[in-house]
Image: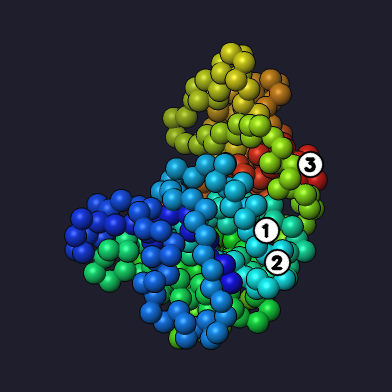
Amino acid sequence: MLVLGTGGTIAGLAPSAAGNLGYTAAQLGIAALLDAVPGLPAVLSGDVLLSEQVAQVDSKDMSFAIWLALAQRVRHHLSQPDVRAVVITHGTDTLEETGYFLQAVLPAALIHAKPVVLTCAMRPASAQTPDGPQNLLDAVAVARTDGACGVMAVCAGVVHAGLDVQKNHTYRLDAFSSGDAGVLGHVEEGQLRLARNWPLAIAGYAHNAIDVISSETTWPQVEIVMSHAGCSGAMVDALLCQCRAGLPVRGIVVAATGNGTIHQDLEAALRRAVQAGVKVVRSTRCTNGRVLPTGASEFAHSNGLSPVKARIALMLELMLGPQAR
Ligand code: SIN
């Protein structure tokens, strides 16, 4: 089994053990994090555990370069016959984006056969009672479960599918939700209690997605704008000015109100964007539910994806072609 480190609070350090806040994320290397999990050999029951540091970043600063490197390393390791799973330590703040990205770009044949388990922590490694070691232990237990496959996230004893997971609390240790889809399962004393089926690859995605996106020198610029009371088209018009200045914005995701409705002034600006060749997708700022097609809007809906995930889907579509959705 491989554990890939990318940083986050799980690898964070504070000046004192009393500090659950006021720490610096991404300080400890992955080997040190694994050394701090005393129960690991028992859970591994003889399996070899290797680790690799892919990045060391506060996940608010996650970059396309790190995503690509991570996808390439996961694909490499999962392709080895003697590797049964990959676990990834990650910051909580953009974990849902990385989960969606990996589920979208990893070859279906690999993630239908083996699991990729993201894990994280809400308290730094230096805290009096850090949550990272238990989360790591649970992630390894899930990764070793017979039949496990697909991209998942494990936090506070709860297992979420990479497609559904969303951070929905700023402070609680149990900071994630799977929304309407419901959680994938629970880890109880090292045993997974599965609540629904393992996550499958997204139908229709290109199998060679990683190779295609690695050949792009820059990924298409896709921005998120929000519709709200008193909204204007100013954000969209600023993006269109940028286009005219030769810095093309290729896509805009609208975090719309309710079932995808958009303030009339923003909607007018989005029409101007479409005329300028920008692809517009409607998501919703509601935490739960999806934008249901009503036939009343000229803008595509996000297939149930939240704004941040719809943005990744649109970037991939612009790189891979329409078969990516
Ligand atoms: C991060 O996302 O890297 C910092 C915050 C966290 O992990 O909780």
Q: Is residue 190 left or right of residue 109?
A: left
Does the beta carbon of the residue at mark 2 sit less than 8 Å from ligand 1?
no
Percent position of residue 244, x then y: 61, 14
Please state which amino acid type lies under the numbered disc 1. Answer: His
Percent position of residue 32, x then y: 38, 65
For image coordinates 28% across by 71% down, the residue present is 129
**Which mark, by number, is residue 7?**
none
Please state which amino acid type lies under the numbered disc 3. Answer: Pro
Residue 285 vertical position relative to residue 10 in the rendered view, above or below: above
- Furthest toward the top, the residue is 245
Q: Which residue is mark 3?
A: 322
Please state which amino acid type lies under the numbered disc 2. Answer: Gln
Q: Which residue is mark 2?
A: 80
Q: Is residue 126 left or right of residue 190?
A: left
The N terminus sits in image quarter: bottom right
Considering only order in the chain, which callout, 1 or 3, is on the residue closer to the N terminus?
Answer: 1
- On the question of residue 257 being in view, the answer is no
